[in-house]
Image: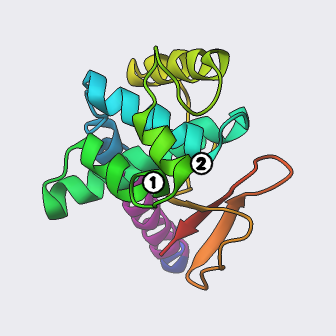
Amino acid sequence: MRNPRTTLSLTLLCLALSVVLLQSVARSDDVGECFPVMDDEAKQNLGRCIHAEAQTHRNDWAPMAHVLVKLWVVRRRTRGWTFNEMVTNYCGCFKNRGKRPEAIRASTWDHPIHGTRREWATIRTFVETFAAGNVGDPAPLANHWRGPNDPERPDCDVVIQPPLTANIFHRCY
């Protein structure tokens, strides 16, 4: 005959595992079903954001792009934003004034005003590959980033930071 405590413990363990698995499936479905289809304007603005926030720090490009997708999933539901609106509302180069942000906003793939043609061509290749869904997320827990000189947020845990990346990627609650 089985011990009732053992049976109860195993039942509760199975129930807890089921809840954890269902939550993880729900989270992965939540993001997976919502990978944005990007038009040319959204791709160009993602490129501008990457150029402004990370420029030649390629280790930052994938986590930045994926953070924007994760934030867009939420903003799409709460505010009805397109992916392009997410990019332009989150990245500082679209809000800040000054010569550098204005030059980045005016730059296009074929006519970069800030940076070199080679930099923009490399960023464009990345953005096209990302938009096709062919770039993995190196920081799946990250949902925010900040520069090394930006103030810390007490409600965030660091996921990736320098020297691996130029920016600091967080999981904020």
Which residue is nearer to you in this view: 16 or 59? Answer: 59
Find the residue positioned furthest to the bottom.
154
Where residue 64 sits in the image (x, y, percent)?
54, 45
Q: Residues within 10 Å of mark 2 (few under 14, many from 20)?
A: many
Q: What residue sits right under mark 1 in the picture?
A: 91
Q: Secondary structure at mark 2?
A: helix
Q: Is residue 29 left or right of residue 132?
A: left
Label number found at residue 53:
2
Q: Which residues are magenta?
A: 6-27
Residue 17 is one of the magenta-drawn residues: yes
Q: Secondary structure at mark 1?
A: loop
Please tell me which residue is depicted at 57% across the width and 24% down the height of the picture: 123
Do residues under tags 2 and 1 come within 8 Å of each other at their CB atoms? Answer: yes
- Answer above or below: position of 83 versus 146: above
Q: Earlier in the sequence, mark 2 or mark 1?
A: 2
Kindly identify the amino acid type of the residue bearing the numbered disc 1: Cys
Where residue 43 sits in the image (x, y, percent)?
37, 27
Which residue is nearer to you in this view: 172 or 38? Answer: 38
Residue 165 is one of the magenta-drawn residues: no
Which residue is nearer to you in this view: 44 or 80? Answer: 44
Label number found at residue 62:
none
- Answer above or below: position of 88 versus 172: above
The answer to whether any part of residue 47 appears in the image is: yes
Please tell me which residue is depicted at 44% across the width and 60% down the height of the picture: 20
Q: How far apart in space, not on screen, are marks 2 and 1 (Cα)?
A: 8 Å
The answer to whether any part of residue 22 appears in the image is: no
Where residue 168 sits in the image (x, y, percent)?
69, 60
Q: Is residue 74 left or right of residue 27?
A: left
Kindly identify the amino acid type of the residue bearing the numbered disc 2: Glu
Please tell me which residue is depicted at 50% across the width and 50% down the height of the picture: 101
Find the residue positioned furthest to the front.
99
